[in-house]
Image (spheres, rainbow, N blue to C red):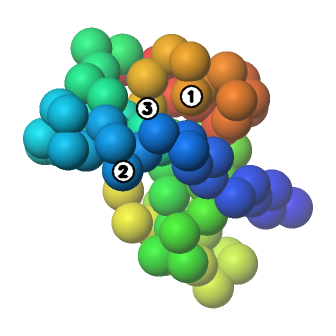
Amino acid sequence: MLITKELYESPMKERNEERFHIDHTSCVCCNKPTKEEFYVHMTTDWVAVESHIQEEDLKKYNKQSQGLFPIGSSCAKKMGKNFIIHA
């Protein structure tokens, strides 16, 4: 069974984008800089999948991977530990 979850989006995301100027290390949820310790695996439908799901597993459910995106520790807590990949 494929378990997915809508990505948490911080109400401060836009403000943080202006403040921190996002790049490849910015948190996908709030746009703050990260230490790149935690990641979330997203599908092309832009939903998060549980951390143990591999790209091959997604094919069984007719889904495709969008890849891993950095997520800050505060936002990771809001997503839940089952969706967080530790670097």
Residue identified by numbered label 1: 75
Q: Secondary structure at mark 2?
A: helix
Q: Secondary structure at mark 1?
A: helix
Q: Is residue 24 visible?
A: no
* Circle 3/circle 1 CB separation < 8 Å: yes
The quarter of the image holding the N terminus is: bottom right
Residue identified by numbered label 3: 71
Report which quarter residue 28 is drawn in.
Answer: top left
What's under tag 2, amino acid-wise? Glu
Q: Is residue 86 visible?
A: yes
What's under tag 3, amino acid-wise? Ile
Q: Nearer the viewer, residue 3 or 71?
A: 71
> Is 29 on the left-hand or right-hand side of 37?
right
Q: CA distance from mark 1 to mark 2?
A: 15 Å
Image height of 60 relative to 32, above or below: below
Q: CA distance from mark 3 to mark 2?
A: 16 Å
Residue reaching furthest to the right = 1
* Circle 1/circle 2 CB separation < 8 Å: no
On residue 56, the disc is none
**Which residue is painted at 36% across and 16% down in the image?**
37
What's under tag 1, amino acid-wise? Cys
Mark 3 or 2, nearer chain start: 2
Q: Nearer the viewer, residue 42 or 23?
A: 23
Residue identified by numbered label 2: 14
Mark 1 or 2, nearer chain start: 2
**Which residue is painted at 55% across and 78% down in the image?**
45
**Which residue is painted at 42% across and 45% down in the image?**
13
